[in-house]
Amino acid sequence: MTNEETLGVKTLLGDPKKAIIKLSVPMIFAMLIQTLYNVIDAFWVAGLGSNALAAVGFTFPFFILAMGLANGVGIGGSSAISRRIGAKDKPGADNIAIHSIILIIIITIAYTVPLFLLARPLFELMGAGKTIELTLAYSQVIFIGSFFLFFSNIANAILRGEGDAKRAMYAMALGGILNIILDPIFIYTLDMGIAGAAWATILSLAISSMVLCYWLLFKKNTYVDFQFKYFQFNKAILKEIFSVGLPAAVQQMSMSFSMILLNLLIVSVSNTDGVAVYTTGWRIVMIAVLPLLGIATAIVSVSGAAYGEKAYDKVNIIHLYAIKIGLIIEIILGILTFIFAPQIVAIFTQSEGTIHIADDLVVFTRIMVLFYPGASLGMLSASLLQGIKRGFIALISTILRALIFTTLFAYLFALVIGMDLVGVWYGIIIANLSGGIISFLWARNIIKKLLRKLTLSIDKEIINQAKKQK
């Protein structure tokens, strides 16, 4: 193993504040490339009209579902690997990585087959209506190529788990840049329309997956090793991965189900243009919370290693420092987004088919800046809970925030109070803020218990040493 490969592990076991920054920055950069692709993708798809944007919107919850499943196993594996690194257990880390790869192959099959076969009735049930053919043209390509989405996510998670954020960044950036290049070629030059956007995404993920596969399985210069010929399923390892990964996957899926319910609510108080506003506007929101996503991925690995070391004082530092940085960044981004909302929206409403949603999109963008600070409380607290093997608690807090509160408050403001589409936006904000506060307080309570445990352990050691001296 080379010095470069051990740097990630040294980072995980070093100063927690430096580790968060060192792991966050590459991931933020990679996610920035991915987000830039999303913006450019929305720009090219917008040229096909609002129906095309709505088609992507109807597919988006299932794309989020796939990401949720992949990220769930990825977070479970990454968290477990980092805890084994903290406990100085390399064979355990190797075994967890192999289990993660095999699990994701099984999950890919279970996801792809039913969704591809049942696509039409599903989207008809969701109210796709006049956009059904466009929705099918886009979604079925995404479903077919979902293996590459799953594999690239799990491979990146393994690299992050061992502290190798740079190579994870390279792979993600490669996929994003390829997507940016291929989008206009497939959509317009090859005249594939909305299906071209889907094929560009899948081909980019396939190439990125090939690079990751080479690093992990063939070049073999990562911290973890893959010895498949000696592999046997281990129930204890599966339980460890699923104890964090399953709740994390359900967290993501709850967000997907929330989006489906919100789409139905939006259609009931507006029309498919409302879905286009929500889908397009949510891309802007995701750009704003992108730094939080980068910090969150770092928290899982860094807190996992600290927990594996039983350095609970580090866990406390990680949580408070991450929340502080997240709040500062999101408040600044919220102010800038509010000021430049018309200019930002103009990027997404260039075509004749989308210009009519511009005013509603500006309203959405300005209202949703109130979402950003609350997101830092909830998202970063949930990531820390995943790192310290409290995945079920992270799940409960996320379901409260993203599914129950969001649906409840959106319905209350939109239909009961009668605020219609704007009421949906305020419902999302109130749900996110209240859920974020609950997540933060829950995490603080668990950390206090860990610190108390650490104090008792130190006191016990001091007493034992005193007895030996006597």
Image (tube, helix red, strand yellow):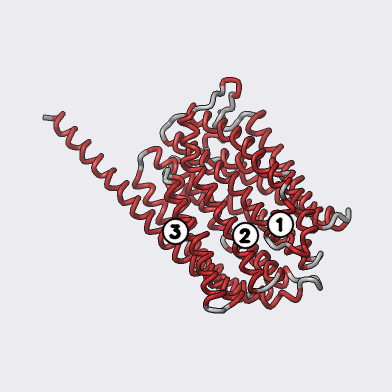
Q: Position of residue 143 (x, y in %)?
A: 72, 46
Q: Using the image, determine if residue 59 lies above or below residue 368.
A: above
Label drawn at residue 20: none
Disc number lying in front (3 or 1): 1
Disc 1 target residue: 123
The structure residue drawn at horizontal position 52% and vertical position 38%, both measured from the top left corner, is 77
Q: Residues within 10 Å of mark 1 (few under 14, many from 20)?
A: many
Q: Is residue 330 left or right of residue 229?
A: left
**Which residue bears the numbered disc 3?**
323
Instruction: Tell me the quarter of the picture where residue 279 sits.
Output: bottom right
| Numbered circles on residues, count | 3
Q: Is residue 317 left or right of residue 412?
A: left
Residue lying at 54% horizontally and 67% vertically, measured from the top left: 428
Tag 2 and tag 3, C-beta contact below 8 Å: no
Instruction: Point out the frontmost of discs 2 and 3.
Output: 2
* Residue type (three-letter) at the residue carrying disc 3: Ile
Give the quarter of the figure containing the N terminus.
top right
Amino acid at the residue labelled 1:
Phe
Residue 51 seen from this side:
yes
10 Å crowding of disc 2: few (<14), some (14-19), many (20+): some
In this rendered view, identify the residue nearer to me: 255 or 209.
Answer: 255
Residue 7 at x, y percent in the picture: 52, 38
Give the image quarter of residue 351.
Answer: bottom right
Q: Residue at x 76, y 52 (%)?
A: 198
Q: Secondary structure at mark 3?
A: helix
Residue 425 horizontal side relative to residue 85, left or right: right
Q: Disc 2 residue type? A: Ile
Q: Is residue 123 above or below residue 12?
A: below
Whether pointer 3 and pointer 1 mark residues with C-beta atoms closer than 8 Å, the reply is no
* Residue that badge 2 annotates: 260
